[in-house]
Image (tube, rainbow, N blue to C red):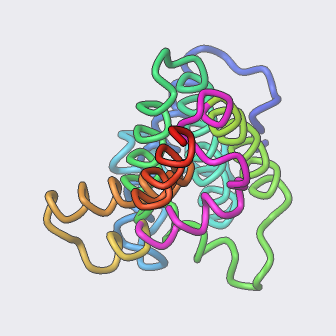
Amino acid sequence: MATSPNTPMRKNARANRERILAAAEAVFGASGELGSTEDVAARAGVGIATVFRHFPTKDALIEAALVRQFDRLTEQASGLAGEPDPGRAVRELIVTLIETSSTKLTLISLVGESGQLPPAVQEATGRVQAEIGRVLARAKNEGVVAGDVTVEEFFVLVRGVGQAAATLPAAPVTLDRAIEIICRGLAPARPAAGRARGSRRDAQR
């Protein structure tokens, strides 16, 4: 009988499940639909029967691997919400989302072929967005991010760079510059130099 994340499992069974999911993320993230459950079993160091005992179909395995990746992103975002420096937290969040874009986009393309993501994946993305919202809210309160920036707008910016990096890898220096540009774009607007000087002159009159 197949198991689910909510089904109590023995310690070795849980370890097998984690190895299978990690292998699935690597195999399908790199090979897409050409990846196979046999490849996953070999990479995880388990028999194919063990894979199917946990995940009865290839689709179920890919979906679980994607949910696992989103859950890890949720944990990372949750940790960054407590980072002493909110500006650094936002930058690290952007870097993490971009670095995981390639695998994430590939897995999403495999589970969302109908144009609709499975409910479990939708729930996982909702959890990620909620934690990212916490990181942004703290950055707004500290004046690092403009108060009118939304989570959706943040995702559009980061997703664009992530997709570009996944399809046409850029030099590290170029990617670092792109991230800096995103961070500057998220920051509150500063008064123009001319207006600021004019205001000071008016105040001195």
Picture residue at 66% right of the left edge, 63% below the top: 153
Q: Give coordinates of residue 165: x percent, y percent.
A: 32, 70
Is any atom of residue 13 visible in this view?
Answer: no
Q: Nearer the viewer, residue 56 or 160?
A: 160
Picture residue at 58% right of the left edge, 17% below the top: 82
- Magenta stretch in the rendered image: 139-161
Q: Give coordinates of residue 129: x percent, y percent.
A: 72, 47
Picture residue at 50% right of the left edge, 19% below the top: 83
Picture residue at 78% right of the left edge, 20% below the top: 8
Q: Nearer the viewer, residue 159 or 199?
A: 199
Q: Give coordinates of residue 133: x percent, y percent.
A: 71, 41
In the image: residue 76, left or right of residue 172 = right
Identity of the residue furthest to the bottom in this view: 114
Picture layout, residue 73 above or below residue 155: above
Q: Give coordinates of residue 28: x percent, y percent.
A: 44, 65
For residue 147: magenta?
yes
Identity of the residue furthest to the front in this view: 205
Question: Which quarter of the rendering shows the N terminus?
Answer: top right
Q: Nearer the viewer, residue 146 or 6?
A: 146
In the image: residue 192, left or right of residue 8 = left
Magenta stretch: helix, strand or loop mostly: helix
Picture layout, residue 20 above or below residue 82: below
Q: Nearer the viewer, residue 202 or 129?
A: 202
Is any atom of residue 69 visible in this view?
Answer: yes
